[in-house]
Every structure is written in C-alpha cells, then in structure tokens.
C-alpha cells in the first residue's frame, strides 16, 4: 500500500533522496534548496542559485552530507552540511562550476577505491570527468578527461544543441572493476543521442567507448533517461533506456569481443506511459525497475522466470 512520506513546498522543481533514503533534498524555482528529514517541514533551507534549481544530486556518503545543485542558468554548485559547536547546522558552498558557453545538464558520482569521480554532461553533448582524491576536500576536484558522446570525429557532424542528458554509473565496486558509465543525450544531432558505455583504461589513463546501445531502427532516437542495474551474480549487465518509443532493456556481456566492444542485446521494449518518460531507477537487487513520466504515473517493471518483462504495479501521483 502506497503511503505519502512528504509534502513538498509550493514551487518545487526537483527532488532527490540521499543514498540512505533517509533525507530528501528539494530544489525550487526561486533558486532555494530545502532538506527534509523525517518531518513535513524542512530542517534546512538556503538560497543556492539566483535562477531556479533544476536538479539536485546527493554526493556519495563517503563525502559526508553533501549535495550537488544544477541551476537553470547552467551552473553547478556543490554544498556540504557543516556543524560548528552550538551553532545551528548550515550548508556552505564548496565549489562552483560555471560554464559561460554551455549549460550543465546532468551530474552523477561514482565511488572507487582511491577516489570519487564526477561526470558532468553539457548542452553541446560533451562530457567532463572530474576526480576527487581527498574526500574531505570537496573544493579540490581535478579535471581528468573531456570528450563528446560520439563514435567518430566531432568535426564530421557539426555543433549539436542538447536539451537534456542522462548519466548512470556502473554501480559495481569490486577491486578489479573498471570505472564505467552510460551516457545518452536528447539533442538535434542523432549521432550524439544513442547511449554509449565509456570505460576507464587504467594502463593508458583514458576513457574508451566499449558499447553503443542502439539498433539500426533506433538510430537518432532522443534519450530521456538511462539506469544501470546493480548486478548480483548475473553473467551480464542490465541497462534501461527511455526514448520516445518506450523503455528499452539491454543486456551487456562482460567479456569484450575481438574489436574490443562488449556484446549487447535489446531484450525488451516496455510501453505503458502515455507520455514522455522522465526518470528510471532500479531497486538495490537490480530486479525491479521504476519509471515515471509526464503522465503522473509511477510504474514498476519486473522480469519473470521465462525472461519476459511485464508491468508489476502502478502508482497514480496526480
């Protein structure tokens, strides 16, 4: 049975749960950010940006209580919660990423044995990867790499204009696990849109394209959301991709083929939302996929023992 856990203030534009699921951050159209704990009233509220906040993302718990905020003006700010003696808890800005030419569209964080990595996607369909070596110094991010989400030379395609982007890290954290993430765009140039998996090659300290999740009939489809499922013992990875055609479920093999690419297979196309899908999220076991969209519905999807995906439950949020 569904139960309401919080009623957000008027003007709410976005929200995000902490990794523990115990705290909720809300970004507002007036540029403020509110933090909700267990009560219906925010425990903290502050002005983060002059423009509206369009996305909030919690940093990994290894960084303490910290939050990334994307503004409608295209800037990204990082904030951390501080407590000094008997003074009330406050949030202070640690870092501001300002792009004068292109807007920041999405940001996601990956945790690794020696560092935290941050992927930032921009409105010209390029991506920057930053690295944080000291988890207590949230102002000391180092630029590790920068590239565009294409398989060939950028000069062949011209300059894209992108409305949105979606990033999902591989959630596995094994010692021998290479850092990898999937990235898709919603742009006016089809070559940039298809979800691509990028993997970090330690030997040469570079990011390599290892898979592209697209079939010939899907080329150019604008991507609205991606989600990488946790893997508990499967001989393949699962990634969900939302486009105008529905939600595609992909299997990605673990062993590269002769050309260095990972084998991919589209195993399902889920339909049920009456409008654009906005967000995808997997449960901790990678067994249930949640989707939400412009039809104000949350839908839960599962795969049965015969490998057939089906809608398990719905929640009307209107």
Image (cartoon, rainbow, N blue to C red):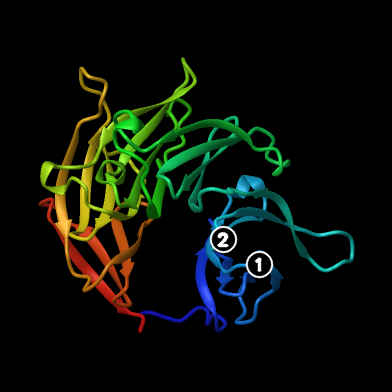
Q: Residue at x 17, y 65 (%)?
A: 271
Between 205 and 70, the residue placed more toward the observer is 70
> Residue 119: percent from the left, percent from the top?
50, 42
Q: Position of residue 36 (x, y in %)?
A: 61, 72
The CA distance from mark 2 to mark 1 is 8 Å
Q: Residue 117, relative to residue 107: is it above or below?
A: above
Report the residue at 61% width, 75% height from top. Answer: 30
Instruction: Residue at 20%, 31% (x, y): give it.
Output: 263
In the image, is 69 to the left or to the right of 281? right
For label 2, the residue is 73
Q: Provide the secondary structure element on which disc 2 rests.
A: loop
Q: Residues within 10 Å of mark 1 (few under 14, many from 20)?
A: few
Q: In the rendered image, which residue does mark 1 sit on?
A: 50
Q: Is residue 43 above or below residue 56?
A: below
The residue closer to the viewer here, 132 or 299, is: 132
Residue 58 position within the rendered picture, expressed as x and y whole percent measured from the top left: 57, 56
Residue 182: x %, y % from top left: 36, 42
Q: Nearer the viewer, residue 27 or 39?
A: 27
Q: Are marks 2 and 1 in contact (CB under 8 Å)?
A: yes
SS at mark 1 in the image: loop
**Horizontal side of residue 63 vs 3, given as left or right:** right
Task: Say if 145 sits above or below 276 in the image.
Answer: above
Position of the C terminus, as image quadrant, is bottom left
Mark number, residue 131: none
Question: Can the viewer see residue 132?
Answer: yes
Q: Give the residue drawn at x 57%, y 82%.
A: 9
**Number of numbered discs on residues:** 2
Q: Quadrant of the N terminus?
A: bottom left
Residue 52 shown left or right of residue 80 in the figure: left
């Amino acid at each position: 049975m569904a139960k309401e856990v919080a009623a957000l203030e008027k003007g709410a534009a976005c929200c995000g749960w902490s990794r523990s699921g115990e705290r909720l951050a809300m970004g507002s159209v007036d540029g403020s950010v509110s933090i909700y704990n267990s009560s219906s009233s925010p425990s903290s509220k502050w002005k983060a940006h002059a423009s509206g906040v369009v996305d909030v993302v919690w940093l990994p718990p290894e960084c303490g209580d910290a939050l990334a905020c994307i503004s409608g003006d295209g800037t990204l700010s990082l904030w951390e919660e501080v407590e000094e003696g008997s003074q009330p808890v406050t949030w202070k800005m640690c870092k501001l990423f300002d792009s004068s030419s292109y807007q920041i569209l999405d940001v996601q964080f990956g945790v690794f044995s020696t560092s935290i990595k941050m992927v930032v996607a921009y409105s010209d369909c390029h991506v920057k990867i930053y690295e944080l070596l000291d988890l207590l110094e949230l102002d000391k991010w180092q630029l590790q790499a920068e590239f565009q989400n294409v398989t060939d030379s950028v000069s062949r395609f011209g300059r894209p204009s992108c409305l949105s982007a979606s990033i999902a890290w591989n959630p596995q954290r094994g010692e021998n696990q290479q850092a990898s993430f999937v990235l898709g765009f919603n742009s006016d140039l089809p070559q940039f849109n298809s979800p691509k998996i990028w993997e970090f090659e330690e030997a040469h300290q570079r990011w390599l394209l290892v898979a592209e999740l697209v079939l010939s009939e899907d080329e150019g489809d604008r991507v609205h959301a991606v989600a990488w499922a946790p893997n508990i013992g499967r001989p393949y990875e699962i990634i969900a991709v939302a486009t105008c055609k529905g939600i595609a479920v992909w299997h990605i093999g673990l062993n590269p083929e002769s050309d260095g690419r990972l084998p991919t297979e589209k195993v399902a196309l889920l339909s049920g939302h009456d409008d654009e899908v906005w967000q995808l999220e997997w449960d901790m076991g990678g067994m249930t996929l949640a989707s939400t969209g412009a039809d104000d519905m949350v839908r839960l999807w599962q795969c049965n023992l015969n490998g057939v995906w089906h809608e398990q439950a719905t929640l009307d949020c209107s």
